[in-house]
Amino acid sequence: MIFDTHAHYDDVQFDADRDELLLSMADAGIGRIVNIGADIASSDRSVGLACRYDFIYAAAGVHPSDADQLNEETFAHLSELCDEKKVVAVGEIGLDYYWEKDPEKKYRQRYWFRRQIDLAREKGLPIVIHSRQAARDTMEIAREEMIGDIGGVVHCYSYSVEQAAEYLDMGMYLGIGGVLTYKNARVLKDVVSFAPLQSIVLETDCPYLSPEPYRGKRNSSLNIPCVVQAIAQIKGLTTDEVEEVTWENAMKLYRMDS
């Protein structure tokens, strides 16, 4: 079975066929999914999906691009969501300088990244890190906040082998999805070759980042076998081996017993 560690099935792109699609997962070999919050509303919706489907779990957090949503009142609500039974992580949180160039807003991203890391530490939950064009600042905060004591995953890993090595030394997992199948993903292929399979988890980030040959179309967990095959080819393993090990990795990441 396959564990999709990072999905957004609350997105409007799934409004027309969400229930039909999710009910098809088991027959396609998709055993568990974690639906990830990106802001306050989507964190609420993620918890709702987890309550509705027994194989779906939730993460609650605010994406750096939505850091302006956070204040003491909304942060208190986020803290309450983290107490929900099927919330298994704080995320996705982090830094995104691709979209944000204003120094003051970058500062707010860093401030609320640290606050959400502290929340995860308080709640005993792992973190799901989003980092885009912010490698240095993300790593600096990771070191200072000692995220290895908290645990978690660097979602949609996109940096160098050297940075991957440091995250792995912290005990973090690397989230690998459809980008691995792209022709221009040479560095990511090097990262997957370097990283032990025991440190890799599968993800879609659906409805985004569909793998080849579905690039440009709506993504879903049904496309993860393309990523499994790519990892298997890079590492010289069978697809069954990749599915089995990444399932166990995801269970450890999200601290699930069975």
Image: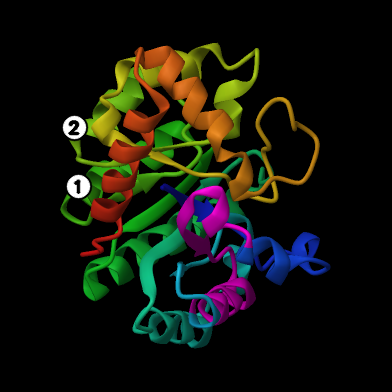
- Residue ID for mark 1: 148
**Magenta region: which residues?**
24-50
Marks 2 and 1, the one that precedes in the sequence: 1
**Mark 1: few, some, or many residues within 10 Å (few <14, many ≥20)?**
some
Work out whether 158 lies above or below 184. Answer: below
Q: Is residue 230 left or right of residue 141?
A: right
Q: SS of the residue at dot 2?
A: helix
x, y percentage for residue 129? 43, 49
- Residue ID for mark 2: 169
The residue sitting at the front extreme is: 27
Which quarter of the figure is the C terminus placed in?
bottom left
Residue type, mark 1 in image: Gly
x, y percentage for residue 187? 49, 14
Residue type, mark 2 in image: Asp
Q: Is residue 222 left or right of residue 18?
A: left
Badge 2 vs badge 1, beta-carbon distance below 8 Å: yes
